[in-house]
Amino acid sequence: FPEVDQSKIKMRNVKLSTLNKEEQKKLLLRPVLNSLAMIDKVKPIVERVRKEGDAGLKAMTKQFDKADLKSNVLLPPFQTPTEDQLPLDVKKAIDVAYANVKKFHEAQSEKKPLEVETMPGVKCSRFVRPISRVGVYVPGGTAILPSTAIMLGVPAQVAGCKTIVLATPPRPDGSISPEVLYVAKLTGVTCILRAGGAQAVGAMAYGTDEVPKVDKIFGPGNQWVTAAKMLVQNDTDALVAIDMPAGPSEVLVIADHTANPIFVASDLLSQAEHGTDSQVVLVGINLTDKHLEEIENQIDIQAKALPRVAIAREAIKKSVIVLVNNEQQALDFSNEYAPEHLILHLKDSVKAVEKVDNAGSVFVGAFSPESCGDYASGTNHTLPTNGFARQFSGVNTLSFQKHITSQLVSGDGLKVLGPSVVRLAEREGLEAHANAVRVRLAELNK
Ligand code: HSO
Ligand code: ZN
């Protein structure tokens, strides 16, 4: 047996006010992802699927996933998992999550077009249409993630996407997890692609005889998946969009004197167990030494009781407690960091939300652990990492749709608007543009 590491699992801590600007900036950094090098590595894999199609995909599934498949694709009706494969209580929990996520994402869909008459007789409108074909990637690997299938499948279903390809790496016997299979049924997935990594992304981006080509690819994944998404997004032949740039998962917890050390530690660890590269930050407001020590002890005690303690230990090692003097400083720091998840353990957490400018999703108060949002409360867990919460939203119903604008100009409308258009077209030296209005005005003035 390898020796078990019994040393204390401890985050380092710093007082923000003692750091200079440079040092403060360093606290905001995430690990550098060498994305260019990764893109070079995935290129031959993606190219191979593109050239060889299903045969290439099959060969790589055998090589990387050790699964020897007749076909990588499963079509509905998908097999219903037996109770042996999927216990009733798990199925019921999936049903609760599915219902809540659906409820929240249905409320996000725009029911009627936006219509504005900008001038009399000039009607502009904007309406929504689903992205027709989407691909959702559900990671395999150390943890099976049926929750990710829910978070991507539900908005695709609610948005009205016609083709939903769910890609996930198969197990060596060719099967996929019964949980994911059940979610695929619930969310109306139209094709399961039993493939992982860059080869799955390549197949969805270009399509093969068996795999439908998609218009947008969603979902978290390892470095290979992320790099492949970035590669195909930049290929005009593929004509495919991606949800957002992905990086290791993160949480920032803000705690004041009212925070329960047990809860705070549990939140930090629920993030730390995701991966050794997980980013965990605690911002403490005016914490007494005793309070801080209680939190530190809880981190150690709770971590050591986890099956994934080795992963949590690595993540915690790289993590930091930032000590500040007041709530404003805490929120300023958090807004600069722009965390994927922000958890507030404050006297008045509800009020503090008003001051949140940058975050993927906020967990408000002592009884709102991130776990609720990760699984079942209704919000989406596919969120911007790496500071991209500054400019990106998390996945939502609109991510699976696009807007089309339209205009209806009446004759009277053109009489009012036309002269301005003509004048601008002349100024740009585009006489054909001006003419398209002039010929109509001439007709109207006959
Ligand atoms: N916290 C992860 C999502 C997840 N957690 C899935 C558990 N399962 C990224 O937001
Ligand atoms: Zn999580």
Image (cartoon, rainbow, N blue to C red):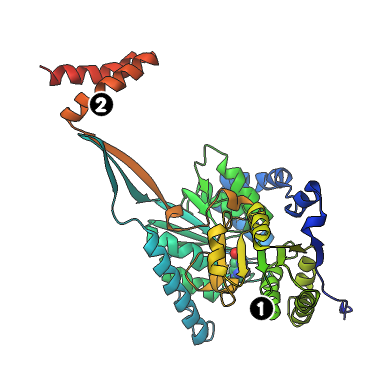
Q: Identify residue type, mark 2.
A: Leu
Q: Identify residue type, mark 1.
A: Phe
Q: Which quadrant of the figure has residue 95?
A: bottom left
The Cα atoms of the two marked residues, 1 and 2, are separated by 61 Å
Camera sees residue 335? yes
Residue nearest the viewer, comparing 67 with 370? 370
Residue linked to disc 2: 417
Residue nearest the viewer, comparing 380 with 346? 346
- The circle on residue 263 is 1
Q: Which quadrant of the figure has residue 116?
A: top left
Q: Is residue 21 above or below residue 334?
A: above
* Category of crowding for the residue at label 2, using alpha-carbon neighbours closer than 10 angstroms: few (below 14), some (14–19), many (at least 20): some
Horizontally, residue 269 falls left or right of residue 158, namely: right
SS category of the residue bearing label 1: helix
SS category of the residue bearing label 2: helix
Residue at point 45%, 69% (across, down): 101
Residue at point 52%, 71% (across, down): 180
